[in-house]
Structures are given as C-alpha cells and as structure tokens.
Amino acid sequence: MPTLALNKRAAYDYELLERFTAGLVLSGQEVKSAKAGQASLRGAFVTARTAANGRTPDFFLTNARIAAYKQAGPLPDYDPLRSRRLLLKRGEMIRLVGKKNEAGLTFVPLKLYTKKSLIKLEFCLAKGKKKYDKRRAIKKREIDREIKNVIKNKK
C-alpha cells in the first residue's frame, strides 16, 4: 500500500478518535497524477451533504489538491481543488453523520494510498485541540526525547 499523500498536521491540530477508509471517485488523469505524487491533503477536510434522494448523505473530500496530469495536455476548466466524492456503504454513511452531529467533531483526511489498483482515503473522526493541548504535546515529546538521550548516553 504505497502512500500517495499524508496530512502530517492532522495529529498536531486534532485529537484523532476513530479511523475510517473510503474509496475515492477520480477521473483517469487525476488517478495518474495522484500516483505520480502530485496530490496534497494540506488544508483538506471531509464534508457530508444530503444526497439527491434526500435520505442518505454523500461524503466529499473538499479542498484536496490533485494537480493536472502533465502528459494529458492542456485541460480547460480543470479545477485541482474540486470536491471529490467518497465511496462508503449506506449504513456507514448514516452512522458517520450521527457521530458528526456530536459537538465539536469533524472529519479530517489522514492519508491517500493505493490498495491494489484502487485509490483509497483514510480519514478520521477528530476533535480540535486547544492551544494549551498543543503545548502539552510538544512538552511531552521534548521530555521523552531527553529521557531517550540520557538512557542512550548511559549505555
């Protein structure tokens, strides 16, 4: 499962609660571009919108950048930041909307990867961290690093 794009900032900005995997609807040239490493999840998020039938929601990856495939030639009206539909089972979509309605929770994309010939998105139900939580995480990481160095130097 080669990773095509990572959202490194997600773990810093959010408390990651539960992970999910979904397929992604892409055009042919977007697949080639993503597999060539031209995808970015920086600033991306997952949104839920009511579907045309009005019963089940549709999920979309919004603000993810997949650049135009260079070998495809000029592509008029191509938007690299367009919303891309996620492929989930109906029951899973309904369950996710219920979880999202809890206060302060959001869906954050973590990584874009391939599974066989398909492109999948791993996203997470997350809760935003406050500034003092981020400082606490940085302080804990520095203390762990110092302890590891002390143990390493004693050996």
Image (cartoon, helix red, strand yellow):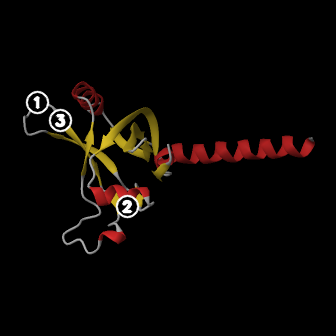
Outermost residue toward the left?
Answer: 53
Q: Position of residue 94 (x, y in %)?
A: 22, 27
Residue 55, numbered circle: 1
Residue 57, numbered circle: 3
Q: Nearer the viewer, mark 2 or mark 1?
A: 2
Q: Position of residue 23 (x, y in %)?
A: 32, 40
Dot 2: element: helix
CA separation, marks 3 and 1? 7 Å
Residue 111, numbered circle: none
Contact (Cβ within 8 Å) of mark 3 with mark 1 = no
Looking at marks 2 and 3 on the same chain, the residue that comes earlier in the sequence is marked by 2
Mark 1 burial class by Cα count in 10 Å: few <14, some 14-19, many 20+: few
Dot 3: element: strand
Q: Amino acid at mark 2?
A: Ser
Q: Position of residue 15 (x, y in %)?
A: 46, 38
Dot 1: element: loop
Q: Position of residue 71 (x, y in %)?
A: 35, 70
Q: Amino acid at mark 3?
A: Pro
Image quarter in which the C terminus is found: top right
Q: Which residue is mark 2?
A: 33
- Residue under the point 29% across and 73% down: 73
In this view, 75 is above or below 26: below
Q: Is residue 64 visible?
A: no
Q: Foreground: 148 or 70?
A: 70
Q: Foreground: 47 or 76?
A: 76
Horizontal arrangement in the rendering, residue 106 relative to residue 8 (left or right) = left
